[in-house]
Image (cartoon, coloured by chain):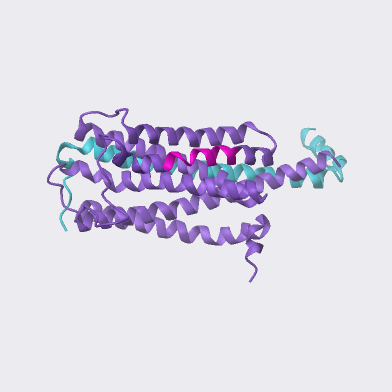
Chain colours: A cyan, B purple
Amino acid sequence: MNWPDLSMGGYGFYVWGSYIFALVLIAWEVVSLKQRKKTLRQQQHAQQEQRSSSVSPAVLTGSANETTS
Amino acid sequence: MNLYKYASPATFYPLAGKMIPWFAITSAILFAVGMYVGFFIAPTDFQQGDAYRIIFIHVPAAWMAMFLYVLMAIYAGIGWAFNARLSSMMASAIAITGAMFTLLSLVTGALWGKPTWGTYWAWDARMTSTLILLFLYIGFISLQSAIDDTRRADRAGAVLALVGVINVPIIYFSVQWWNTLHQGATIRILGKPTIAGPMLAAMLIMLAACWLYSVAVVLIRLRCIILEREQNASRFAEVNA
């Protein structure tokens, strides 16, 4: 095994530029998918809370008043 | 065994969830192996020097761009013809990854073109048709997001995707049909490849890695789309209750 010449015989900018661009795109795709999953989960929680809170809204407002006073 | 069972989003959702980590892990391993073979084992090209090493990402990206477009059009077409919701959702899930690979092939191609041809861009048949492919993907994505009714968005997207399929053979055969700046194919369906062993191996391993990566991210996105559409449906039901 020989270590490759990191300057790529003078073509370093083009070769590493290509791979760095690929890495950036992959990172962008993975991060944006994670973000999408996260917001979906938050929305699901909000929907569930809405359903349960609609049963007894008085309890929620009551507790809110207690903390502010 | 009932294969149709998996055509329903509700049963497909957990199955996809179990498969995603395997595709992702195998893909990461193959990327590492491909880079190792491509940079440590494959020799320097006598004509292009080390600049040719862009091939290990450029060619797989260009192939994925074309494969994924055809796959997207097939899924969109099936979703439209048989009113199969999951199939249409699959088409939407593929679009962004396909567009990403098209952009990657254009940018890596430009970075390869500068040292070998002396220019980042030329209005050559293959580059122009690949740019059109990128516009087709972007058109599909923006058309779908512009229509609120999901089933109508699916149908409109399917028409665009199917019409655009004509562009894929144009890209593939452009180097034979026209006298282009772009070099000819190194891997041929018929006949021997015109490339040395380790170079070919690195390229094929990277292609496999790109395939598995695509499967993993497309399945993750598909799961998001299933949930989003379900949520919209339940919200709609609540409002109209």
Query: Is residue A25 visible to the viewer in this orientation of the structure?
Result: no
Q: Per the image, is B241 magenta?
A: no
- The residue under the point 40% across, 33% down is B131
Residue A21 seen in this snapshot: yes
Instruction: Answer with left or right where residue B87 lies relative to residue B44.
Output: right
Q: Position of residue B238 (x, y in %)?
A: 81, 42
Majority secondary structure of magenta residues: helix
- Residue at 43% x, 59% y is B25
| Quadrant of the snapshot with the N terminus of chain B | bottom right
- On screen, residue A15 above or below A1: above
Q: Total label count?
A: 0
Q: Position of residue B129 (x, y in %)?
A: 39, 34
Residue placed most toward the observer, B174 or A22: B174
Q: Which quarter of the rendered picture does the C terminus of chain B lie within?
A: top right
Q: Residue at x 55, y 62 (%)?
A: B18
Q: Nearer the viewer, residue B212 or B172?
A: B172
Magenta region: B157-168
User: Among all residues in the image, which is located at the extreme left?
Assistant: B46
Q: Kindly indicate the quadrant of the structure image that contains residue B47.
A: top left
Residue B133: percent from left, percent from top: 44, 36
Queried whether the magenta region covers residue B167, the answer comes back as yes
Q: Find residue B227 and report its horizontal and vertical position in percent.
A: 66, 48
Give the residue at the far bottom of this rendering.
Answer: B1
B210 vs B161, left or right, is left
Q: Is residue A68 left or right of B53 when viewed as pictured?
A: right
Q: Is residue B220 above or below residue B168?
A: below
Residue closest to the eye, B196 or B38 = B196
